[in-house]
């Protein structure tokens, strides 16, 4: 009898257990799908084709945005690169004609989209709908840098990035904000304390390591892999911008502190100079942009930006830097056409080139050409009377965007090193009398031009 | 696995029927010992698997629960950090169910402390007279509203009744009197206090002190009162200490449908009080308005800056009317709050708008001026593509066709350099002097009160030389100065598209409002088609004025212009009168005329080259200053311009005339 009992108990146990197991399996599946969205697709996603997870996620995301009238556009460098290669084909492809999944099925960790924030009408409800569709989203916010320049304003935080995952693929939505100077800005994706650092491999993100600035792209609608998406009309230009898009904000707080110590000059002359300098800079920026020549704020203009977020009223000129490899022979004529006659030209392309143009109201535009050596950069100076040459040394630097007097312009990213090289550690203290041959910290005598070359290397107008 | 045990009761019932097949099966199996063994081991293994799966499930659920518990915590902290300076601190851990409340009432000082935290303290001299009212959330003890009603003065008791009626049932009400609170406490107010259960409130007498704590619609939680012994003395100070039981959060809240809008409403209503039906549980008033879109809206992308201070009830009223105006685009609206005030920010959040706070700089008028500058700069920073900005203030009602009015006229600002602004406000547009909603004027004065600013004007001219904080200037006075205006004019409508309802303000009081703003005409007709907008351009307007003057009938100048009979009892005619005006800045007669017509007379407004245009008795009425005005040539030679003597001596002339 005991054996029978044992068997019966075992059998009954097994039966109940299987009932339990079945229930648990059912429950577990529910639990999983609630947690990970459509957890089912994972099992089938290995085949590269239209049912790859990436393609499905992107499709869902595009469905979501278009149903909510959110005009997102594709900025993913990897995919834009592919599109750019087959641009003609992509432009001509009609809806649904794609036979294989060429773009959105490429293996990658993220797909990056962007959005102009002022066109986004229903952010809150969008977020909710996204979550209902199974997306898990992280939102990154920060204070609005456009209010930083104004003393004492604090506003609602603005969204900078969204990262939404669905079935193991993530969409990175970069929120672009309009800035003064007709450009788009995106913020730094900063991982704050409570954020799950394993949510996505953040290190592999293409945008957000630094704040960035971009020209406002024109958009066009194309059909890629059967999905209708907006992309920049000139993907090539956009792709070229990405690696050089890093943006640095002016140090408004320090600038305010500066003005507390050294009062701002609000005399009529100072205001008039600032106005003319601003106009001159805008004209120069426009001219150089047309030529496709990179430039940055140098010397006093750079110091003004860094120290006080403005133009130093007693500086009396505008200083720009250009790499000699970007030199174009039509720079002089382009400036002349823009109404800025050449005032003097020192040096030559091979050595110590420096151009100076006469702007309105006695404001001068100085353009210094920078030469690169293995471990430093330099630009040259020439004394017209004596033919003496000078050399100004700078540690190596790269270029970043910033906003200055309502313009998007470049400055050396390593600004403090650049400024300290030029003005020494005491750059914070205003100095009104300045001798370009002696005052700079980094000036070195560099010999004398041979008299035979003077006609070429010292031209005064 | 503990919970599962084969029940000895069930087993026999269940087993009996199946006995026969079970036995056969059993005998079959006994013959195959190996197979049986195998089955047994299988079953044991199976059981093991079940155990493991179960344990995993339990662990998973545990983790999920603990995660869910951890999550809201930082949010809560943040919420707390967000301010609520006045929230009473909880003692120890765990929810406390009782608040101890202290209320003090005396001649020169009142204070209220909740759980040891002072939420009201007023011992300033010559200030804060009357009944102080505090509303607490019955579930959290947070201060939701704080008001003082100077019921020594007339009409303040009406405001108190209005306010107390708006407070939701169940809230904790605290009242305390400072100095005097009974002189103008009328029967309605007393009846209301009686209905709250107060004994002493309805019987409050001259210079009595009184402290009261009660639940709205519920029991009185404490009351103390001290009668003033004589006319010349005050009642003794009273200190009321009482315990207020907190109710559960469930009871304190309404159960609205779970929508985005109601979430905003909920956040708002659990924090502040005194906004009436917006927090009504049964039938809350909407907080989203869907006014008709404007066809061909030219101002859809023009940013709107609302300049606000700490008058949240005004802001609430203002934003309601703004969001109800046809063609409004809420995402273009930014509210700039002068100071770190929370309640205005709550109002802004209720409507889902963008709000920006501004650390106060300087004092009084200069503070307003700096706030304006920061707000305008920020507006153009936030909307760098905008060519214009609409500037509004928190104490304005906005007409339903405000944006339609701007949409029809904004092109003028682009095409006509001689324009300074477009304003929705006609300084001289009173009930009895404005008539035609489709009519626009050009005027040399800048009215403000709802106006459009050109970005180029701001960025190139105004911003660089905006008065610095140490200059204690009014921004609007400064903008009206000839150095800034430089001969440019503003476009205004005959009937204003904004209404100035603010009674409390920097340069504002009840008397002033009643005299100069209350009877102002305000357009309520939607979709008015403006007439002949292009005739407002510089040259065209001169042609228009000349045409008007040519067809105008000259009035009988022997009559008194202040009398109603100065104008015949006609309708739709155009009349002209000539007044004496020796120089461009001689407004002696005009000011007297304005005074007797009961229109704005504190300074000169609404003139265009010595011409004023208004309506009287439904007739267009033109006033020309002779000989300063270039239109003087239209004066028939026989007419002697009217001259009105200013009163002999100026007694207590109002100081700086505030406007805006």
Image (cartoon, rainbow, N blue to C red):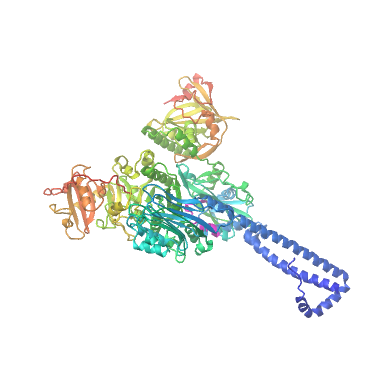
* Position in image of residue B306 (x %, y %): 40, 51
Decide which of A83, B10 is in the foreground and name it.
Answer: B10
Q: Quadrant of residue B223?
A: bottom left
Decide which of A9, A135 is in the foreground and name it.
Answer: A9
Say whether residue B156 is visible: yes
Point 88% across, 70% down: residue: B33
Vertical comparison of A306 with A166: above or below: above
Please give the count of numbered marks on the rendered protein: 0
Q: Quadrant of residue B204?
A: bottom left
Vertical comparison of A430 with B239: above or below: above
Q: Does A71 sit left or right of B655 as displayed?
A: right
Point 51% across, 19% down: residue: A450
* Position in image of residue B45 (x %, y %): 80, 64
Quadrant placement of the C terminus of chain A: top left
Say whether residue B326 is visible: no
Q: Does B232 sit left or right of B572 as displayed?
A: right
* Position in image of residue A40 (x %, y %): 65, 61
Decide which of B542, B352 is in the foreground and name it.
Answer: B352
Q: Is residue B614 magenta?
A: no
Q: Does B23 sit left or right of B217 as displayed?
A: right
Residue at the outermost left position: B638
* Position in image of residue B119 (x %, y %): 47, 52
Magenta stretch, residue numbers: A114-129
Q: Quadrant of residue B158?
A: bottom left
Q: Main secondary structure of the magenta part?
A: helix
Vertical comparison of A412 with B65: above or below: above
Quadrant placement of the N terminus of chain A: bottom right
């Amino acid at each position: 009898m005991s054996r029978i009992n044992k068997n019966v108990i075992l059998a009954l146990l097994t039966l109940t257990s299987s009932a339990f197991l079945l229930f648990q399996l059912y429950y577990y599946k529910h639990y999983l799908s609630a947690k990970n969205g459509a957890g089912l697709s994972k099992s089938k996603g290995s085949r590269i084709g239209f049912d790859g997870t990436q393609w499905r996620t992107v499709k869902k995301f595009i469905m979501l945005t278009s149903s909510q009238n959110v005009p997102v556009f594709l900025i993913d460098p990897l995919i834009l690169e592919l599109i750019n290669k087959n641009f003609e084909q992509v432009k001509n492809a009609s809806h649904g004609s794609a036979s294989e999944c060429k773009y959105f099925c490429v293996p990658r960790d993220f797909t990056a989209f962007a959005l102009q924030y002022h066109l986004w009408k229903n952010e809150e409800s969008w977020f909710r709908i996204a979550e209902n569709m199974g997306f898990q989203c992280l939102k990154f916010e920060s204070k609005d840098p456009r209010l930083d320049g104004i003393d004492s304003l604090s506003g609602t935080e603005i969204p900078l990035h969204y990262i939404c995952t669905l079935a193991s693929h993530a969409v990175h939505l970069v929120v672009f904000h309009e800035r003064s100077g007709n450009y788009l800005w995106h913020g730094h994706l900063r991982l704050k304390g409570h954020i799950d650092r394993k949510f996505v491999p953040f290190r592999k993100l293409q945008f957000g390591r630094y704040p960035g600035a971009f020209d406002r792209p024109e958009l066009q609608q194309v059909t890629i892999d059967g999905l209708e998406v907006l992309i920049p009309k000139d993907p090539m230009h956009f792709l070229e911008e990405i690696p050089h898009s890093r943006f640095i904000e002016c140090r408004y707080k320090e600038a305010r502190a500066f003005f507390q110590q050294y009062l701002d000059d609000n005399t009529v002359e100072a205001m008039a100079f600032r106005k003319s300098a601003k106009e001159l800079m805008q004209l120069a920026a426009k001219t150089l942009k047309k030529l496709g020549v990179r430039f940055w704020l140098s010397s006093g203009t750079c110091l003004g930006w860094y120290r006080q977020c403005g133009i130093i009223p007693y500086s009396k000129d505008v200083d720009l830097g250009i790499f000699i490899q970007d030199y174009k022979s039509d720079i002089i004529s382009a400036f002349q056409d823009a109404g800025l006659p050449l005032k003097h030209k020192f040096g030559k392309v091979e050595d110590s080139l420096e151009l100076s143009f006469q702007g309105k109201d006695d404001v001068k535009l100085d353009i210094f050409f920078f030469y690169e050596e293995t471990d430093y950069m330099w630009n040259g100076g020439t004394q017209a009377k004596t033919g003496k040459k000078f050399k100004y040394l700078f540690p190596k630097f790269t270029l970043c965007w910033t906003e200055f007097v309502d313009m998007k312009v470049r400055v050396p990213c390593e600004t403090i090193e650049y400024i300290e090289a030029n003005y020494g550690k005491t750059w914070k203290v205003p100095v009104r009398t300045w001798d370009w041959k002696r005052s700079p910290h980094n000036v070195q005598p560099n010999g004398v031009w041979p008299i035979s070359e003077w006609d070429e290397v010292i031209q005064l107008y | 696995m503990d919970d599962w045990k084969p029940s000895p009761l069930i087993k026999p019932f269940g087993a009996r029927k199946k006995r026969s097949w079970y036995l056969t099966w059993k005998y079959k199996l006994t013959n195959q010992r190996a197979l049986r063994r195998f089955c047994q081991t299988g079953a044991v293994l199976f059981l093991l698997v079940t155990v493991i799966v179960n344990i995993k499930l339990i662990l998973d659920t545990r983790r999920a629960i603990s995660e869910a518990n951890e999550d809201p915590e930082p949010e809560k902290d943040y919420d707390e950090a967000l301010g609520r300076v006045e929230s009473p601190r909880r003692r120890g851990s765990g929810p406390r169910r009782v608040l101890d409340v202290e209320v003090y009432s005396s001649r020169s000082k009142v204070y209220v402390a909740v759980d040891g935290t002072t939420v009201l303290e007023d011992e300033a001299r010559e200030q804060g007279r009357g009944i102080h009212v505090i509303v607490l959330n019955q579930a959290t003890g947070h201060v939701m509203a704080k008001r003082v009603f100077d019921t020594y003065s007339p009409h303040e008791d009406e405001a108190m009744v209005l306010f107390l009626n708006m407070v939701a049932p169940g809230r904790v009400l605290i009242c305390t009197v400072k100095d005097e609170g009974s002189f103008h406490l009328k029967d309605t107010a007393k009846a209301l206090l009686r209905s709250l259960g107060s004994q002493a409130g309805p019987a409050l007498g001259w210079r009595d002190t009184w402290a009261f704590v009660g639940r709205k619609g519920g029991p009185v939680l404490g009351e103390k009162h001290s009668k003033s012994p004589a006319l010349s003395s005050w009642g003794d100070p009273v200190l009321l200490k009482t315990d207020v039981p907190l109710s559960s959060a469930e009871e304190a809240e309404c159960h609205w449908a779970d929508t985005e809008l109601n979430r905003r409403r909920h956040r708002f209503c659990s924090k502040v009080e005194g906004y009436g039906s917006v927090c009504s549980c049964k039938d809350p008033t909407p907080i989203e308005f869907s006014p008709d879109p404007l066809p061909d809206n030219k101002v859809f992308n023009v940013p709107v800056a609302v300049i606000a201070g700490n008058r949240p009830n005004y802001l609430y009223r203002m934003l309601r009317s703004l969001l109800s105006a046809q063609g409004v685009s809420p995402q273009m609206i930014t509210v700039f709050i002068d100071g770190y005030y929370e309640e205005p920010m709550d109002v802004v959040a209720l409507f889902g708008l963008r709000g920006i706070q501004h650390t106060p700089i300087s004092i009084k008028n200069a503070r307003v001026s700096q706030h304006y500058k920061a707000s305008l700069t920020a507006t153009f920073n936030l909307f760098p593509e905008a060519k214009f900005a609409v500037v509004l203030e928190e104490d304005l009602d906005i007409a339903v066709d405000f944006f339609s009015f701007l949409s029809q006229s904004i092109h003028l600002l682009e095409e006509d350099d001689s324009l300074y602004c477009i304003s929705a406000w006609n300084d001289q547009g009173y009930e009895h002097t404005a008539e035609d909603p489709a009519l626009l004027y050009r005027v040399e004065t800048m009215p403000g009160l709802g106006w459009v600013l050109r970005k180029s004007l701001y960025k190139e001219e105004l911003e660089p030389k905006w008065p610095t904080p140490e200059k204690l200037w009014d921004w609007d006075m400064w903008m009206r100065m000839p150095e800034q205006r430089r001969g440019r004019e503003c476009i205004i409508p005959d009937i204003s598209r904004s209404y100035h309802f603010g009674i409390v303000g920097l340069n504002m009081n009840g008397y002033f409002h009643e005299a100069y703003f209350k009877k102002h005409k305000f357009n309520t007709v939607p979709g008015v088609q403006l007439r002949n907008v292009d005739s407002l351009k510089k040259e065209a307007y001169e042609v228009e004025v000349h045409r008007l003057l040519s067809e105008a009938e000259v009035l009988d100048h022997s009559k008194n212009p202040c009398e109603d009979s100065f104008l015949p009892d006609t309708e739709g005619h155009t009349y002209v009168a000539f007044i004496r005006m020796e120089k461009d800045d001689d407004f002696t007669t005009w000011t007297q005329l304005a005074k007797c017509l009961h229109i704005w007379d504190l300074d000169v407004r609404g003139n265009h080259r010595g011409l004023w245009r208004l309506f009287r008795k439904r007739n267009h009425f033109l006033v020309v200053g002779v000989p300063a005005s270039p239109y003087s040539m239209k004066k028939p030679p026989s007419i002697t311009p009217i001259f009105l003597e200013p009163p002999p001596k100026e007694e207590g002339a109002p100081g700086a005339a505030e406007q805006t």
